[in-house]
Image: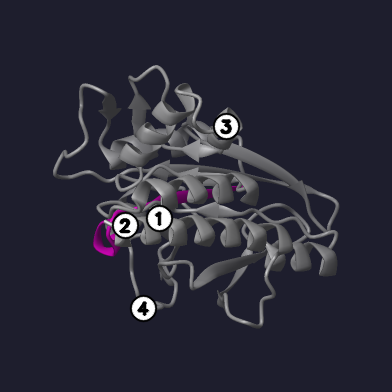
Amino acid sequence: MSYWKAFAKKYPSVPFLRVDGGSIFVNGVAEAPVLNRWTLEGTYRCGLDALNLSAWDLPVWQEMADLTAAGQIPKEFLDVPLVSANVTAKLPNFPRLQRYVIKEHSIASGNRVRIGVTGLLYDPQERISRSEFEIRDPQAAVRQVMEEIRDKTDYRVVLTDMDIGKAMSLAIVVPGIDLLLVAHNYEVASEPQQVGDTLVVIPVNEGRMFSEVRMNFGPAAGRAQLVTRFVPLDRTVPDDPEMGELVRKAQAEMEDLRKGKSLH
């Protein structure tokens, strides 16, 4: 948050989008319910422009929706821009899913640029219940979305949790994708790769750094020149007071939980 605020202060006339490829929650540990509740609140307060619904996160979103319905979590915490080109929830209380979002911003030339963002969930082993969710073939689904938004957008972004090999293939066979963000739990920083007209960006996991893509547009809102870099979230990036307080509260609750366990 503090980096985004500093960027907005330094470049007040430069618009930016905050997107996330998903896999934000924790699974398989006793502390998961507490950690995920705080992660949900932090994600809500970050004000993302788009968040991919990943296979890893889907069951937790379902759990968070159930807790919200039971009045245990504020309803507004589910008001995040979840996007997915290939998933439709059949459950009545699942968080709202959008096939895509389109953001329009003014650029320095005085023109406006329209950026479309969609997401793809990858579940080749079909671990997700097909009776509760309709999950379409990722390639066919994103191709349909690209065709649908082609004339509505100048730049198109796809967020996905599929592995890098599948993502590369997707970039080759589906036209119209300008930026493909692959959130597949990679621990080592990898340089972005250009595959045809598509830039493939692979963020580092666990929030240690984020990937920044700067788009420099010419006089018209056409093809952009891209500059990419990793921004380490270390001591050079000061803590945001509001998010810092949220983290302190989460840490305190986790510590109480651990102490409670140690007494048994």
Colour setting: one colour
Residue type at numbered disc 4: Val
Decide which of tag 2 and tag 3 comes sooner along the chain: 3
- The reply to whether discs 1 and 2 touch (Cβ–Cβ < 8 Å) is yes
Q: Which residue is mark 1?
A: 257
| Label 4 SS | loop
Is-magenta flag for residue 68?
no
Badge 2 element: helix
The three-letter code of the residue at mark 3 reads Pro
First reached walking from the N terminus: tag 3 or tag 1: 3
The quarter of the picture where residue 128 lies is top left
Looking at the rendered structure, the kind of residue marked 1 is: Leu
* Residue displayed at 29% across by 63% down: 164
Label located before the other in sequence (4 or 3) = 3
> Looking at the image, which residue sits at the far bottom?
236
Q: Is residue 233 above or below residue 196?
A: below
Q: Give the CA separation, mark 3 to mark 1.
A: 21 Å
> Which mark is in front, 2 or 3?
2
Q: Does residue 159 show up magenta in the picture? A: yes
Magenta-colored span: 154-168
List x then y, in percent, for residue 148: 49, 31
Position of residue 163 measured from the top left corner of the image (x, y, whole percent): 27, 59
